[in-house]
Amino acid sequence: MPDDPNAMLDQWADANEYRWGFTTDIESETLPPGLNEDVVRRISAIKREPQWMLDFRLEAFAKWRQMDEPEWAHFPDHDWRPIDYQAISYYSAPISDDDRPKSLDEVDPKLLETYEKLGIPLEERAALAGVAVDAVFDSVSVATTFRDKLMDVGVIFCSFSEAVRDYPELIKKYLGTVVPKADNYFAALNSAVFTDGSFVYIPKGVACPMELSTYFRINAMNTGQFERTLIVCDEGASVSYLEGCTAPQRDENQLHAAVVELIAETDASIKYSTIQNWYPGDENGVGGIFNFVTKRGICRGDRSHISWTQVETGSAITWKYPSCVLKGDDSAGEFYSVALTNGYQQADTGTKMVHIGKNTTSNIVSKGISAGHGQNTYRGLVKVRPNASNVRNFTQCDSMLMGSQCGAHTFPVIEVENDTAIIEHEATTSRIGEDKIFYLNQRGLSSEEAVSMIVNGFCREVLAELPMEFAVEARKLLEVSLEDSVG
Amino acid sequence: MSLLEIHNLHANVNGIEILRGIDLTIDGGSVHSIMGPNGSGKSTLAKVLAGDPVYEVTEGTVTLNGVDLLDMEPDERAREGMFMAFQYPVEIPGVSTKYFLRAAVNAMLKHRGKDELDAVSFLKKVKETAPMVDLDPALLDRAVNEGFSGGEKKRAEVFQMAMLEPTMCVLDETDSGLDIDALRVVANGVNTLRNADRGFLVITHYQRLLEYIVPDVVHVLIDGRIARTGGKELALELEEKGYGWIESSCDSTSGC
């Protein structure tokens, strides 16, 4: 092992000081609040979409109108239901829809300034880190780097709008195949009104030469974000995709309902990593983002592999289950998660592993940390279908509690319809130990440092799955998110 | 001014008084031992000095180098030079010993106004120090105390002591659970660390440890008070006679 990876992380983190809570004033073209068929048509028209795309939206919208908001999630302290869908504006763009910048020189300097504050100067950091960044800023992609380099090996990495225009056959072939239009209430809403997002296609046999990274950012007031991500890994291809989000402080609740679809063909491998640190609301639980996301991948081909890693520290409410449909024989799904809730944050998250193919395996590691009045719920499904022989699943589900006002809950569901399956489930719940804190205190470390160290240790297996720069940001985030949570 | 001065120290746990008026002065360069029967308050004294929040000090004063120790948080005490080798070191899953120890060493250095160690100089110091307690450096890549044997935990405690260079070292029954070879190794480590400025308070149940770490002063703690103080020969006497003869010479109301 490297001598001291943590030291390297520290240095990296110091050099990339993380800053919070700012808003950039950029002229937005924003649709007035409200949702009806005209709004759906208007979004499609603004984006100059072909008829088939509009049809997709309209079908989704028709279905959404017939659906009811789901109510089964476990959010004891937070009432999210008064979301007024007619009070949300469904489109906002930093610049008019024409003339998307071809290079950074053409990008609004204020936007670049925002990236600076976020610690992600595209021109330097992306190059240094070897990461291509498709930055989604208020619904429209404004900067994409490294595209040429990626194109050399046939990798497509572009905004979803561009993909609809330039690669309609691929979009038509794959869009909605993993998360159908009417999969659930929020997925249907997204399918109707999504504004932009990312599209990735890795052709046969290509290992994507760099990690692909998208930074999402919510900036305009009262604008719901409806991102759409579609990643297709063709036979024998592989990719690692990073998604990270930050948001400036604000008072208004904001709905975020993204849809992410992953498709892994035979022998393909997709690794999808997320750091989510949207505004969680103030100390009284006022404001904050509602993060209701549908993420699902399908291992379509034999021996394919999908791995989800997420570090969830933000949002007032997080409600999502990155899942894997293991259809191909010998395919494998993984889910590694850290969910931290502090203040009045609520998280109901977990995964679904659906074993359809033979000899499929899944691995689930979930770490929930609750502090303050935070409520943390793990909800998981492991399903083994009748024809799926020799399935292996291992689930580890650990919860850590800090203080006496928070809660941890687990709802694991296992449905096995084939006798040959071996399913293991381990779960622990612990209070952060005063004895551990005292031990570290006795070695000269402050209580804050001690808690941060204990929590990072608790999450180690998950953080180890993240690419290094992401692991640093994750560690920083856990630290910052737990500030003032030790009495 | 002595290194450590304890006056009339009283402490409770869960409302029950355990320490009932301790007076003790330790000079730099000297080794004091505290012996006593089970439940006499030996470990409580160690933990109260280190600032364990479980214990409540109700009366008395403690100074370290003239500074009020009781007024400080446990981490401040540690940075001021107070070190306690735990009787039962806790495990901290997922935190590598190296990472933890470097953070601790640097916290000390920073407090002393010295430059913090980079990864290279830290590892150099580790390599120089580990042989002192015959510690397998591979242990340091494992999580703090996780999966360590009893002997490894105690060696790791003394190793940490050597790395952190405290001025006042409290060893809380460091000999418990050690076989004779491990005991020798740990004692050698402690002896190596003895110098003119550093004070030691060695808490033990048995005289055995004191054959290897030879104390300057031996105190017998009974019922939360120091019942006898003597030279190293007192330990031998206790070995021979047990604690009964001191206990019987004490009176529960008037003390010893």
Image (cartoon, coloured by chain):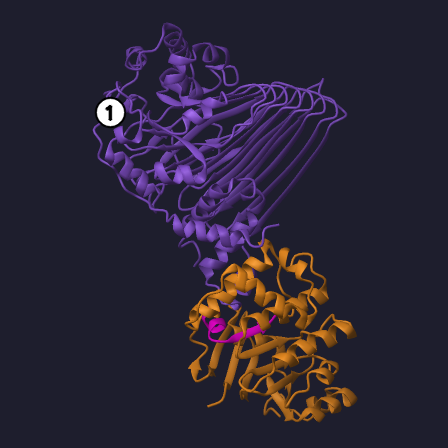
Look at chain B in the picture and name its colour: orange
Q: Is residue A88 left or right of residue A182?
A: left
Please state the horizontal and vertical placement of residue A274, each as a whole percent of the image. 47, 35
Please state the horizontal and vertical placement of residue A76, each as a whole percent of the image. 45, 38
Look at chain A in the picture and name its colour: purple
Identify the element where label 1 is drawn: loop
Q: Residue at x 53, y 73 (%)?
A: B50
Q: Quadrant of the C terminus of chain A?
A: bottom left
Please state the horizontal and vertical placement of residue A424, each as a whole percent of the image. 69, 36
Q: Is residue A427 visible?
A: yes
Whether A29 is drawn above or below A26: the answer is: above
Which region is colored magenta?
Answer: B75-86
Please state the horizontal and vertical placement of residue B33, each as a whole percent of the image. 64, 84
Q: Is residue B157 visible?
A: no
Whether B232 is drawn above or below B63: the answer is: below
Q: Residue at x 59, y 59 (%)?
A: B97
Kind of residue at disc 1: Ile
Between B51 and B215, the residue placed more toward the observer is B215
Q: Residues within 10 Å of mark 1 (few under 14, many from 20)?
A: some
Between A278 and A111, the residue placed more toward the observer is A111
Residue A363 magenta: no
